Image: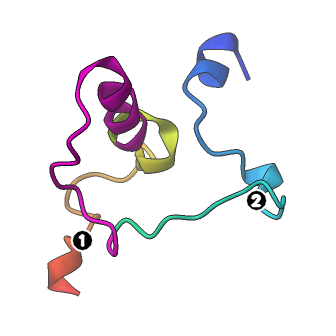
């Protein structure tokens, strides 16, 4: 794994059983106005939307992924 991969790594799958791990069900905690502004709020949403936990495998395209409301 190169340095860029490490910088983009948000989930540590090898440590998911750690007592320090916390899971958040984003379907039960939908995005909405939080009242937070500025750099810290931007960093949180950037982590959620851009870091590797939520990046689909490149071999999958938009036709492979299903919208949650169609299930």
Name the residue located 17 percent from the left edge and 55 percent from the top edge.
32
Query: Relative to 44, does residue 68 appear above or below in the rendering?
Result: below
Q: In which quarter of the view is residue 55 placed?
A: top left
Above/below status of 28 relative to 24: below
Task: Single out the residue that lies furthest toward the bottom.
Answer: 71
Does 20 lie within the magenta span?
A: no
State the residue position of label 1: 66
**Residues under labels 1 and 2: Cα distance?**
25 Å
Residue 46 horizontal side relative to residue 34, left or right: right
Q: x and y percent of residue 23 in the render?
A: 58, 64
Crowding near the residue tagged with mark 2, few <14, some 14–19, many ≥20 C-alpha atoms within 10 Å: few
* Figure check: 33 above or below 38: below
**Quadrant in the rendering for residue 49:** top left
Quick one: quadrant of the N terminus? top right
- Count of numbered circles in the view: 2
Residue drawn at x 50%, y 64% is: 24
**Rendered location of residue 6, percent (x, y):** 67, 23
| Residue highlighted by disc 2 | 16
Q: Is residue 2 left or right of residue 61?
A: right
Q: Which residues are magenta?
A: 27-48
Residue drawn at (30%, 27%) of the image: 42
The secondary element bearing badge 2 is classed as: loop
Residue 22's label in the rendered image is none
- Front disc: 1 or 2: 2
């Amino acid at each position: 794994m190169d340095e860029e991969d490490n910088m983009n790594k948000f989930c540590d799958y090898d440590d998911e059983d750690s007592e320090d791990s916390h899971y958040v069900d984003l379907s039960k905690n939908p995005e909405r106005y939080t009242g937070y502004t500025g750099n810290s709020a931007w960093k949180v949403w950037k982590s959620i939307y851009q870091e590797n936990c939520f990046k689909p495998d490149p071999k999958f395209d938009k036709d492979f992924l299903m919208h949650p409301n169609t299930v």
